[in-house]
Amino acid sequence: GIGDADAWKSLQDSRKTLQTKGTEDLFGASVAHKLRESLKRTKSTSSSSSTALASGSNAAHVPTPDYPLYFEEQSDARCGMHALNNALATPGGAAFFTIHDMTSACECVIAESLIPDDNGVYSDVKLKEDHMKDNGWYSDDVMSMVLRRTFNYELQLGTQLKDDYNQFLIYDPQIVGAITNKDQEHWVALKLVQGQIWLLDSLRKPEILTQEKYVEFIRDYPHTYAIKAYR
């Protein structure tokens, strides 16, 4: 995240391996304590609270109008593209991906599915409608492909942030942001900026998530994946 490299480094000073060290050793006492408290509160959260979050209730977030980076609002029902552009945003930046980029990535996913395996079998042929919808939703495969084609970013589909250890990845300076597939209907982004985790939903204003609400969000929407930068 922007301005957070020093904080991440301090959390990593005592890190050796996850198998031999606890959360406090890995990330520092302060952050470890915050996460433990968040997990405790999240596990005891009532079902009504989860329902409020899923429905987009403002009670689940701490709103603020002072988001300092480029932010893309919903246009032409392209939530997947907006989520990626918001996750990759920089100060004074602009859109990273276009509709053409997204469509080309979808075509690449389909083309790859037409390559037979070593036995000449077409085992997983994909159709366009499986990966791109009129409401702007794109499949995980398309979101991953459009990042892959930059040769600079990777969507870490094998690593869900909901897992206890992976929740801290948002603080890693190599992680530029994360995207969330909400119920196969809508994409949003998460981004660490100046020590604060922002929820970037193109249908709403940018909002700060407290540590507790961040943990609650990624548990309610487990299809949340980090974007790693190779630079």
Image (tube, rainbow, N blue to C red):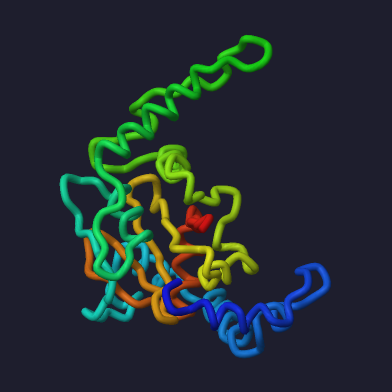
Residue 3's image quarter? bottom left
| Left or right placement of residue 64 versus residue 181 in this view | left
| Left or right placement of residue 141 versus residue 96 in this view | right
Q: Is residue 3 above or below residue 130?
A: below
Percent across and percent down for residue 153 are: 48, 51
Q: Residue furthest left?
A: 76
Percent across and percent down for residue 149 are: 44, 40
Residue 36's image quarter? bottom right
- Residue visible at 48% across and 50% down? 152
Q: Residue furthest front?
A: 231
Q: How many marks?
A: 0
Q: Nearer the viewer, residue 92 or 59?
A: 92
Q: Residue furthest top?
A: 120
**Quadrant of the rendering where the N terminus is positioned:** bottom left
| Left or right placement of residue 45 versus residue 185 in this view | right
- Residue visible at 44% across and 67% down? 217
Percent across and percent down for residue 92 are: 24, 68
Q: Nearer the viewer, residue 71 or 57?
A: 71
- Residue visible at 61% across and 12% down? 121
Q: Residue furthest bottom?
A: 30
Residue 189's image quarter? bottom left
Q: Nearer the viewer, residue 113 or 63?
A: 113
- Residue visible at 37% across and 60% down? 87
Q: Nearer the viewer, residue 17 or 45?
A: 17
Q: Is residue 158 above or below residue 42?
A: above
| Left or right placement of residue 176 versus residue 72 in this view | right
